[in-house]
């Protein structure tokens, strides 16, 4: 069976509180998540605590979630989008 188009990640739209939407490649989103998680190792969500490295945490988060709580009531969100020319 061919690869389903719904699983092809071309770009992500990223929403941050108080900021305009941002379009990032999968690699750029992974880098942003890695930076955010690197500063939050003392306060990780429970599902990320099982991973030994920040890189593993960021990859798991990018591939299985669409939100990271930054502070109570504020969250970063990301969604896969396809850009057509």
Image (cartoon, helix red, strand yellow):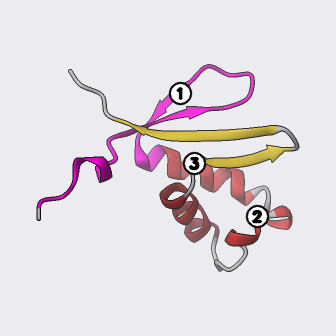
Q: Position of residue 13 (x, y in %)?
A: 49, 33
Which residue is under mark 2? Answer: 45
> From which residue to which does the magenta span run?
2-28
Determine whether the residue tagged by mark 1 lies in a helix, strand or loop: strand
Q: Position of residue 64 (x, y in %)?
A: 52, 60
- Tell me the residue at 78%/64% (across/down): 44
- Tell me the residue at 59%/46% (across/down): 32
60 shown above or below 66: below
Tell me the crowding category of disc 1: few under 14, some 14 to 19, or many 20 or more residues within 10 angstroms, Cα based: few
Q: Which mark is residue 22?
A: 1
**Mark sitting earlier along the chain (3/1):** 1
CA gap, disc 3 and disc 2: 13 Å
- Tell me the residue at 24%/25% (across/down): 84
**Mark sitting earlier along the chain (3/2):** 2
Q: Position of residue 79 (x, y in %)?
A: 49, 40
Q: Please tell me whether residue 6 belongs to the stretch shown in magenta.
A: yes
Which residue is under mark 3? Answer: 66
């Amino acid at each position: 069976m061919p690869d389903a188009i719904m699983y092809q990640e071309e770009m992500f739209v990223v929403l941050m509180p108080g900021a305009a939407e941002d379009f990032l490649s999968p690699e750029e989103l992974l880098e942003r998540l890695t930076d955010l998680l690197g500063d939050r190792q003392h306060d990780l969500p429970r599902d990320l605590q099982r991973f030994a490295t920040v890189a593993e945490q960021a990859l798991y988060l990018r591939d299985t979630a669409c939100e990271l709580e930054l502070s109570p009531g504020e969250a970063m969100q990301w969604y896969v989008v396809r850009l057509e020319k």
